[in-house]
DNA sequence: ATAACGATTAGCT
DNA sequence: GCTAATCGTTATA
């Protein structure tokens, strides 16, 4: 399967909602000793910087959020609820502290490796459905934070894949947060079984 | 105290 | 198949 070339830094240096929208259909690849896993993205979520009460950058730079203040095109991996890892991509201009959370996707390579990282009996459709499931399938952990995802030979990278047309994109409110819930910054590929909540609509033309 | 969550369970369609 | 409710577990502020 042709997954295309690695996305450049310019791809990420745009506002987070634009990047989140444009990431649908793209492919994230992670290299680990036990194998490569690639996931085609079907659900993403944008986080603005210090203006966004739902962002980890809301109260300014902290040891955890510092990565988001760096250049776009790097990974922001954080640990949540005592057990989960989640993967974001830093975007916007340097210092904007914006990011896109990768929420769900379809495993398109290394399904056996991904399956071995999940609970026995997990269906293929659920392998990378949900931010922590996606991160688990890719084998991510704390050491994957602050990596350059624009490096063709990097451990973690994004490939061009097949961009999704506007007719196949739905937008809706973000989920799993308690503040600024109503901002429509969650993007999904319409009709994809890996997306759960139906509270989505067509983006305004 | 709270959290950008997922697994499980219970109950319904 | 679906939704709602509950809980586990620890970094962060």
Image (tube, coloured by chain):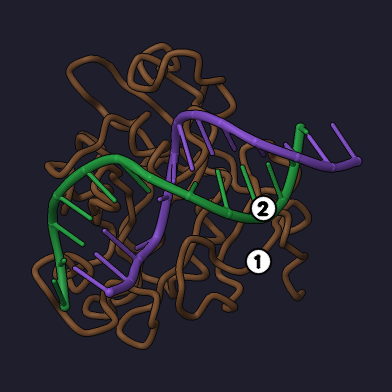
Chain colours: A brown, B purple, C green
Task: Say if A156 sits above or below A51 in the image.
Answer: above
Residue C5: give x, y in percent of width and height. 58, 54
Q: Are marks 1 and 2 in contact (CB under 8 Å)?
A: yes
Q: Residue at x 27, y 65 (%)?
A: A72
Q: Position of residue B10 (x, y in %)?
A: 65, 36
Residue A99 on image: x %, y %: 35, 66
- Under tag 2, what secondary structure? loop
Identify residue for label 2.
Answer: A197
Q: Residues within 10 Å of mark 2 (few under 14, many from 20)?
A: few
Q: Is residue A4 left or right of residue A34?
A: right
* Residue A11, quarter of the rendered image: bottom left
- SS at mark 1? strand
**Residue at image x 59%, y 27%?**
A125
In the rendered view, tell whether residue A122 sits above or below residue A168: above
What numbered label is drawn on residue A172? 1
Residue at image coords 50%, 14% = A121
Mark sitting earlier along the chain (1/2): 1
Percent position of residue A4, x then y: 46, 35
Residue furthest to the left: A63
What residue do we see at 62% from left, 38% from top? Answer: A194
Measured in 3D between alpha carbons, the distance from the residue under mark 1 to the one under mark 2, in whole angstroms, is 9 Å
Tag of residue A25: none
Protein chain holding label 1: A
């Amino acid at each position: 399967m042709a997954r295309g070339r690695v996305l450049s830094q310019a791809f990420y240096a745009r506002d987070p909602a634009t990047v989140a929208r444009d990431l649908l259909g793209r492919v994230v690849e992670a290299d680990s000793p036990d194998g490569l896993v690639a996931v085609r993205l079907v659900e993403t979520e944008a986080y603005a910087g210090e203006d966004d009460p739902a962002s980890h950058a809301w109260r300014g730079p902290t040891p955890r959020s510092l990565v988001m203040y760096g250049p776009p095109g790097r990974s922001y991996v954080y640990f949540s609820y005592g057990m989960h890892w989640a993967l974001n991509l830093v975007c916007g201009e340097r210092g904007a502290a914006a990011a896109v959370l990768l929420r769900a996707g379809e495993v398109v390579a290394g399904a056996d490796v991904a399956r071995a990282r999940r609970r026995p009996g997990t269906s293929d459709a659920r392998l990378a459905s949900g931010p922590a499931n996606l991160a688990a399938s890719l084998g991510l952990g704390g050491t994957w934070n602050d990596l350059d995802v624009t490096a063709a030979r990097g451990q973690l990278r994004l490939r061009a894949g097949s961009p999704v047309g506007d007719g196949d994109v739905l937008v809706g409110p973000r989920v799993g947060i308690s503040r600024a819930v109503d901002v429509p910054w969650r993007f999904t590929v319409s009709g994809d079984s890996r997306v759960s909540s139906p509270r989505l609509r067509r983006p305004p033309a």
